[in-house]
Amino acid sequence: MYGRALQLSEWLEMKKQLDFVERDYASRLDLIAKVRGLQKAEDYIQTIPKAFRGELLLLYKRLDKKKIADVLLLMEKENVKLSPFTYRILIDTKGLCNDIAGMDQIVETMKAEGLELDILTQSILAKHYVSAGLAEKAEEVLKMMEGDNIKENRWGCRFLLPLYAELGKADEVERIWKVCESNPRFEECMAAIEAWGKVGQIEKSEAAFDGQLATSKKLPAKCYTKLLKVYSDHKMVQKGKDLVKRMDDNGLKIGPLTWDALVKLYVEAGELEKADSILQKACQQKESKPLFASFMAVMEQYAKRAYKNGKAPAYGIRERMKADNIFPNRYLAAQLAQVDAFRRTAVSDLLD
């Protein structure tokens, strides 16, 4: 699907069907990195107008954060002014690295340059404050996002719902949801399913899902997957099974995101063999392959089980991945090494 999306993007530009802006270049760059690799993505940067060169930051934020400083120096050398989009990437990168002080410094720089934080950037800022345990700072940002009248700033509800849920504030989730409950937009409904699940009110997650189902002839698979993740987080295996059956009955395609939610559902429920079985079947699909996260979820449990059971090895995962042309990243490779029965060590070399 990434390949098709890239072809569509290239066709739109070639036929001049779309005037590319920052967001479009960022999307194209991301697709090239996924389909053709990092080097091709770096080559593509040279064809982007200088005013939009900040998109290279997006690439390195995902693949190699160490190169971000080099990109900033290059932008300074070429007199490329940082845009709100570029600042958003930098704020997110600092947050992902748990550098809250650095993140705050970037925000102050934006303000000094007369740039306002849009609601998406504010949501990223709040998310990282929550992750860092800075609840008060997160709430300050959330109140800024709401403004004087949340009904007039309704577009922010989709961001506010899961963020208040992360803070464990069910009352605030209820208050924000009431703004849009009578006529929810799709993204608001998705956010409500996630938020109610995070605060442990599964019935309200289901009600949000059913409400959306009642207004749509056919919901997309990602809406089912969102509820499936709620069931996974709460180890509700039977409800998860029933939901997947509903997906199948409604003719929806079961893809990588659904497989991932299913795998994690069984992992969380302690049914590792069933999770592994689903992963094997997913690997046999021709159209798409499982997510790395699915392999990691299974491997982490095998690693824990191996430790508990005298480090008994788990066979076959590496071979299945090779057969499907799926190559582990550094983290997953480390997980594989923990349960590799044939790995070479200094001691094994001595004993051979």
Image (tube, rainbow, N blue to C red):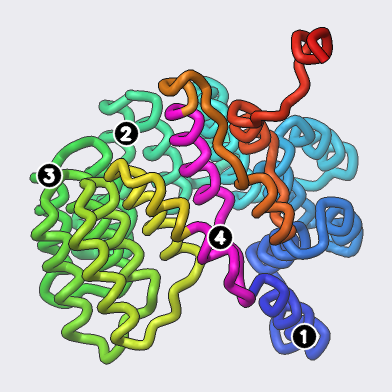
Q: Which residue is mark 2?
A: 138
| Residue type (three-letter) at the residue carrying disc 2 | Ala
Q: Earlier in the sequence, mark 3 or mark 2?
A: 2
Q: Is residue 46 above or below residue 224?
A: above
| Residue type (three-letter) at the residue carrying disc 1 | Trp
Question: Nearer the viewer's eye, disc 3 or disc 2?
Answer: 3
Question: Nearer the viewer's eye, disc 4 or disc 1?
Answer: 4
Residue drawn where x is 52% and y is 22% of the image: 311
| Residue type (three-letter) at the residue carrying disc 3 | Ala
The disc at residue 11 is 1
Question: Nearer the viewer's eye, disc 2 or disc 4?
Answer: 4
Contact (Cβ within 8 Å) of mark 1 with mark 3? no
Mark 2 secondary-structure assignment? helix
Q: Does the image show residue 208?
A: yes
Region in magenta: 279-305
- Look at the image and tell me in which quarter the N terminus lies: bottom right
Q: Residues within 10 Å of mark 4 (few under 14, many from 20)?
A: many
Looking at the picture, how far across and down is residue 3, in whole percent?
72, 74
Q: CA gap, disc 2 to disc 4?
A: 34 Å
Q: Is residue 341 left or right of residue 209?
A: right
Q: Earlier in the sequence, mark 2 or mark 1?
A: 1
